[in-house]
Image (cartoon, rainbow, N blue to C red):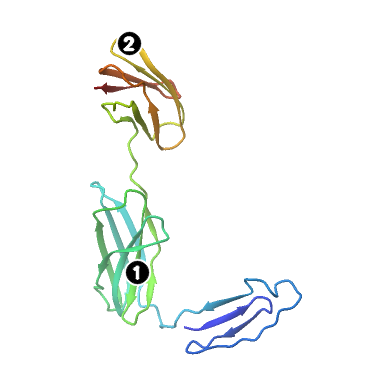
């Protein structure tokens, strides 16, 4: 590996002594960029390990019926490979090792590798392959993404039965955005609570303060979505 000090002001580069000290003389002038904080920076070249020892021709990942994720990668020209690491990320930037696979070909031919991720992340799952040669050269495959499992559409209330303080959460999942009208009625049909909630996110939780000291029994929470469709939730007060 080689290192170079780049001087943006003079537009010059100086090779660094990677085993010792490099002294560089420079001057500061009354000119723009001469005393800039980012005037200098260092660039390192990649080490020359020779030809790439493998070609990762494809990486695929798909969610199975049991919600596990099957990952497969294919290689060509595999030779002098120490092994592979299947890596996973939740954001496509920071990866961690998930599984290791020993090279099976190493004869210049083709190979296919498979792994089942039995405990995928709850959100998005990003995968890539890290290949390491016997000589220490590391190369990475392209990144593939499996989107988060889409939650079903529902509205729920928690806790149910309602706590003594009357504080509950109304949870919306994959509902149409807009204003939702709420009406809580007792068994006699009397309205004891009215409210309106604006839903703007795919998954949203709204805190509601229901009346305290409500009589024990069954209540009905009627919810009208922006289109006017009504949904009824059964609410228990103990």
31 vs 25: above or below: above
To which residue does mark 2 refer?
Answer: 189
26 vs 220: above or below: below
Residue 38 figure quarter: bottom right
Q: Nearer the viewer, residue 173 or 20?
A: 20
Q: Residue at x 35, y 80 (%)?
A: 136
Disc 1, SS: strand
28 vs 166: above or below: below
Q: Nearer the viewer, residue 129 or 202?
A: 202
Q: What is the x, y in percent for residue 51?
A: 40, 81
Q: Earlier in the sequence, mark 2 or mark 1?
A: 1
Name the mark on residue 106: none
Q: How crowded is mark 1: few (under 14 residues within 10 Å), some or many (20 or more)?
A: some
Q: What is the x, y in percent for residue 161?
A: 26, 26
To which residue does mark 1 refer?
Answer: 130
Q: Nearer the viewer, residue 70 or 137?
A: 137
- How many numbered marks does the figure carry? 2
């Amino acid at each position: 590996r080689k290192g170079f000090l780049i001087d943006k002001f003079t537009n010059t580069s100086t090779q660094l002594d990677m085993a010792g000290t490099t002294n560089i003389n420079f001057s500061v002038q009354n000119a723009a960029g001469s005393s800039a904080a980012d005037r200098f920076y260092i660039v390192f070249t990649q080490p020359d390990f020779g030809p790439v020892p493998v070609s990762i021709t494809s990486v695929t990942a798909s969610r199975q019926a049991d919600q596990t994720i099957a990952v497969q990668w294919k290689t060509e020209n595999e030779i002098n490979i120490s092994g592979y690491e299947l890596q996973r990320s939740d954001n496509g930037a920071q990866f961690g090792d998930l599984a290791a696979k020993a090279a099976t070909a190493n004869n210049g031919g083709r190979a296919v590798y498979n792994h089942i991720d039995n405990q995928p992340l709850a959100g998005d799952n990003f995968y890539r392959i890290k290949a390491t040669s016997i000589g220490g050269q590391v190369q990475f495959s392209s990144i593939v993404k499996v989107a988060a499992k889409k939650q079903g559409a529902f509205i729920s209330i928690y806790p149910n039965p309602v706590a003594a303080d009357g504080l509950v959460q109304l949870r919306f999942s994959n509902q149409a955005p807009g204003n939702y009208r709420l009406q809580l009625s007792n068994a006699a049909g009397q309205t004891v609570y009215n409210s309106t909630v604006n839903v703007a996110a795919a998954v949203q939780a709204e805190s509601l303060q229901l009346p305290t000291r409500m009589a024990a029994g069954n209540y009905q929470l009627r919810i009208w979505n922006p289109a006017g469709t009504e949904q009824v939730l059964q609410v228990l007060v103990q």
